[in-house]
Image: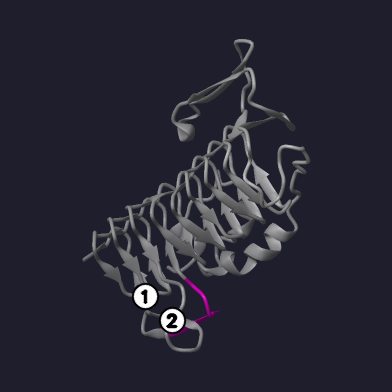
Amino acid sequence: MLTNHSFFDTSDFPHADLFQQDTLVWQPLNGLKNYMDSFPYPQYNHPLITSGVPLTRHIIIHNGDIFPSDGVDIIYGDTTKGKLLVKRDEKELSGASVIMAGAVLIGDSISIGEGVLIETGALVKSPAIIGDMCEIRQGAYLRGYCLAGKRCVLGHTTEIKHSIFLNDAKAGHFAYLGDSILGSNANLGAGTKFANLKFLPGNVTIFHDGKRIDTKRRKFGAILGDNCQTGCNSVTSPGTLMAKGAMLLPNTTAKGGYHAEKEIIR
């Protein structure tokens, strides 16, 4: 019941190797650093990109090439639906990604997929893996060891560190995620916060099925299975596990531990 298989469908997730089906659902967090440290990152060596310095112009990444947006038409459609379009001389540059002026990239362990939009004011620290058709909105703060699958939203003034987004996961507005996992199609209401550190010393423990399980993690936020939702201004306590389809209502704090499939947390 607490396995990856019971929380997630990873059949189309580009990094499914992180999710061994019969292991405990927080094990991918334990393997995230090693996985990302050994990932083959592309090298974005270009005069327009200086680590830690805001971009002075929009840049385009297409088929491994990097070039300024001069003479390029950009249509800012819905990124997660493949409607971010880049054209040059009226020819569409299929799969082109856009990093807007004012965005900041820090370090050289950053992978940006096809059709990605990184908006002005976003800050992305290495290491980071951003999958195809993801949208990193204005003011997003990726603090390192952030991994996103396809069609994800890493939202406006949302802070994320050491966390995993499966395909189509969205944290659109004013959220905090630390040491957490969002399943496919999980969606966070504005202002959702995942607390990841207990007040008292010691590891986060999970009480389940009459037993207390030591996760062996000092920092542990929340894990939301596929199709979970949270309402606006909701909070999860350290070690919150929401199984597939569970829902956390607005202005509500979820207790740590297991919450069943399709449970409504009030």
The colouring scheme, among rainbow, by chain, secondary structure or one colour, is one colour
Quick check: is 9 in the magenta stretch?
no
Q: Is residue 13 left or right of residue 66?
A: left
Give the x, y percent position of residue 44.
Answer: 74, 41
Q: CB of mark 1 within 8 Å of CB of mark 2?
A: no
Residue visible at 71% across and 50% down?
Answer: 51
* Residue 164 lies in quadrant: bottom right
* Residue 34 lies in quadrant: bottom right
Screen quadrant of the N terminus? bottom left
Q: Which of 112 and 208 is in front in this view?
A: 112
Q: What residue type is labelled 1?
A: Gly
The residue carrying mark 1 is: 256
Q: What residue type is labelled 2?
A: Lys
Residue visible at 57% across and 66% down?
Answer: 29
Q: Is residue 71 left or right of residue 159?
A: right
Judged by depth in the image, the label closer to the viewer, 1 or 2, is 2
Screen quadrant of the C terminus? bottom left
Residue visible at 59% across and 17% down?
Answer: 87
Circle 2 crowding by C-alpha within 10 Å: few under 14, some 14–19, many from 20: some
Quick check: is 217 in the magenta stretch?
yes
